[in-house]
Amino acid sequence: MAAPAAASGPSLVPLKVRGLGLALGGKQLISGLDLTIGGQGITMVMGPNGAGKSLLLRLLHGLIAPSAGRICWGGHPMSASVTRRQALVFQKPVLLRRSVAANVDFVLRARKGDARQRDALLDRVGLSDKAGQAARLLSGGEQQRVALARALATGPEVLLLDEPTASLDPTSVHLFESIIRDTARQGVRVIFVSHDVGQARRMADDVVFLHRGRVVEHKPAKGFFDQPDTELARAHLAGRLVM
Amino acid sequence: MQDFGEAVGMAVSLVASGDGDLIEIVLLSLRVSLTATALSCVVGLLLGAVLAVTRFRGRQAVIVAVNALMGLPPVVVGLLVYLHLSRAGPLGFLGLLYTPTAMIIAQTLLITPIVTALSRQVLEDLHSEYAEQFRSFCLSRGQIVRALLWDARYSLLTVALAGFGRAIAEVGAVIIVGGNIDHLTRVMTTAIALETSKGDLALALALGLVLMAIALAVNVVVQGVRLTAVRHAYA
Ligand SMILES: Nc1ncnc2c1ncn2[C@@H]1O[C@H](COP(=O)(O)OP(=O)(O)OP(=O)(O)O)[C@@H](O)[C@H]1O
Ligand SMILES: [Mg+2]
């Protein structure tokens, strides 16, 4: 079981993003991005390659500073203490050169979590039998599950996921999705980037559709999949959108 | 002057019989160089880690300076330490000149830049891979440094061995500050230099054999460490 969301101070939701801009290396990658995400549940972020999904998650997690605009989590401007209450599972997991168990232990120790949670966390992501193995010798999908266990070990209030199931087999995807759903049900706000339309349909409460660094559409899931407002989203869902 | 064949024969029998003088010299060499290596690791790993994870004005200049100091000639280090420890020098009152302690000081100064520069490179490469994940975990500087030192442990062990290899093989620094005094400060390299000039090739050759065996052993260990690390994907 993950640590329950550490309620330190008022909630981090709703998230309010206003006029967000990001320029890197002379290129405007995100501009004028507005977004409000409230309440509970799972927000799926979709969009073509290079739309800015990974950059948006980094901005929302405070790993990069925007060049314009504001990000407010439940009224708190982005800060280290906001980052501390979130966890991000990266598109490419970065595992420590240690065993699977030691990877989880590291986070529990660093974040002063309960060391006894480790076995439960590994059990939850289905890696109990690999606890003693070198983490970096695991398969891609197994590594992604270690990354999820570590993220849950921080006891986040907001869980940011960047295409975490892209290299998982169907059984692991199923497991992963059920863990995320449980986590969301426990009150953790989940923002989930995925290219998998089927997964988005299964998981989403609402969908944010990004294109060229802007929010093109943000709607409740049913509305988005049944009746997208924009031609861009329609084309993307039909698999005929070019960047 | 012995002839070469005779010298080799005597050298081998000196090593094989575990000659007392020979063992004393070898043990002192190991004591001096291992202590110097340990001290340089304490200082060098920490400095290397700080240089790897911090950004400050003049950092590039410090890195260039440390890299340049890697090539410091041992005789220059010996001379500098001599000037400080000699009777007239600022630290002359300590009475350390021509003692093993002086030799340890000189070798520590000689190899600390090596350990610092090499570990800085190792730790900086690792940090560039981990940095974003560590920021996501909200780690403190201390936690980052400790994690990097631990995760780079295999590479850092080879860094330490590189420092040891340099220390055990150098002659310039220890001969100046140690003086090659029999039963007191005579180590393998200074004994080889002296015995060769005296024409006693047997002892010089015997010590040369031991020195080469140590160099070989260090390389075997380095290779073993590297292979172990690769096998566990810890490299
Ligand atoms: N550090 C950087 N410097 C310059 N450009 C960058 C940098 N990082 C990302 N970009 C560019 O920003 C754009 C958006 O990148 P991002 O990684 O957010 O895309 P994405 O939506 O996550 O795509 P994918 O679906 O392929 O993961 C890309 O065109 C990328 O080339
Ligand atoms: Mg991405």
Image (cartoon, rainbow, N blue to C red):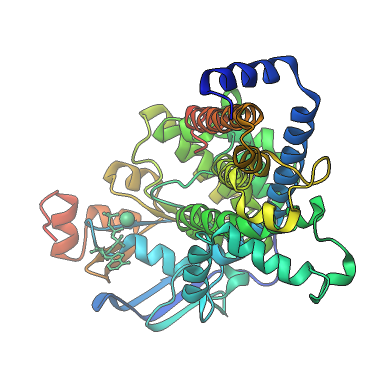
- From the top left corner, tell me how far across and down residue A37 is, in percent: 45, 68
Q: Decide which of A196, B80 is in the foreground and name it.
A: B80
Along the horizontal axis of the image, is A165 left or right of A216? right
Q: Image point 43% across, 69% down: which residue?
A: A59
Residue shown at 56% from the left, 41% from the top: B158
Visible residue check, residue B144:
no
x then y, percent, for residue B34: 72, 43
- Farthest residue to the front: give it: B1
- Residue A79 position, x and y percent, is 57, 75
Q: Is residue B175 visible?
A: yes
B216 or A110, nearer to the observer: B216
* Residue in front for this viewpoint, A5 or B79: B79
- Where is A103 relative to B15, above or below? below
Q: Quadrant of the C terminus of chain A?
A: bottom left
Residue B60, given in percent of the width and then of the height, sits at 46, 73
Q: Residue at x 33, y 50 (%)?
A: A194
- Toward the viewer: A130 or B18? B18
Q: Is residue B17 left or right of residue A208?
A: right
Give the left or right position of residue A180, taking residue B102 as reference.
left
Which residue is drawn at the image coordinates 63% and 47% (left, top)?
Answer: B167
